[in-house]
Amino acid sequence: MAKINLRGLVNLDTTQSQWVEAVLADFNTFLSDHASAEKKASGMALSMASHYPDRPDILTAMADLAIEELAHYKQVINLILKRGLVPQSDRKDNYVAELNRKARKGRDEFLLDRLLIAALIERRGAERFELIAHHLEDTQLANFYRNLAKSEARHWVLFVNLASGNYPESEIISRFNELSEIENDILSGLPISARLH
């Protein structure tokens, strides 16, 4: 798999401190939403594996990713149950839905956008999990989120590198940066709550 030069990619707008405060004030709600996000991430990886069986790089990477995300889901569910909480039903993630609406419709364009949107979601997850880890007083929980942040960082780079095996680097950088600006705008327009996005 080719590797892209990440220095050409624009930075995230930093998550507002009010988001961290909202999460810490209602961590149980955050855990429930986090579990849902991990489950959906596993499902997304399986969906990509199903849609692109003719691309072995994507197929094998997504099979591995689906397993890893499902393991994260199980870990978060265990945290929820250990707290004596009842896992909640999934709620629509407007952030992900809005980003997915920005994917172009042509076959080649759709694949590129799907990979890059997944990269953006994982990149935001890495940033937010690191913020949570930094602010948690529970050392064990902080370490859990720090490790998840590292996983998410690997995942977003994986998606960009999968794109680089299928598209020219200049096209990837241009579209990634365009979608990054869209992602920043979407996030800034959403209400701050104890949810991952």
Image: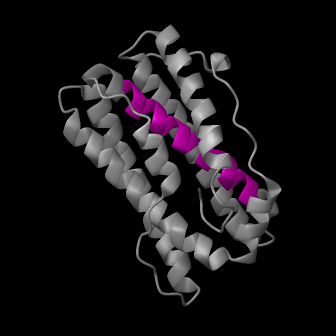
Q: Is residue 55 above or below residue 172?
A: below
Q: Does 82 sit left or right of 161 as displayed? A: right
Which residue: 68% across, 47% down?
A: 188
Q: How many marks?
A: 0
Which residue: 45% across, 79% down?
A: 88
The span picked out in magenta is 112-133
> For the C terminus, which image quadrant?
bottom right
Q: Is residue 117 magenta?
A: yes
Q: Does 143 sit left or right of 57 as displayed? A: right
Q: Does 20 sit left or right of 89 as displayed? A: right
> For the N terminus, which image quadrant?
top left
The front one of 104 and 90 is: 104
Q: Where on the picture, by quarter, is residue 100?
A: top left
Q: Main secondary structure of the magenta part?
A: helix
Q: Where on the picture, by quarter, is residue 144?
A: bottom right
Which residue: 56% across, 45% down?
A: 152
Residue 102 on image: x %, y %: 44, 35
Residue 137 on image: x %, y %: 81, 71
The front one of 98 and 84 is: 98
Q: How is the image coloured?
A: one colour
Q: Where on the picture, by quarter, is residue 146?
A: bottom right
Which residue: 79% across, 67% down?
A: 21
Looking at this view, name the residue that lies furthest to the left: 54
Residue 115 on image: x %, y %: 41, 32
Q: Is residue 121 above or below residue 114?
A: below
Q: Is residue 61 magenta?
A: no
Q: Is residue 159 above or below residue 37?
A: above
Looking at this view, name the residue that lies furthest to the front: 189
Residue 156 on image: x %, y %: 53, 36
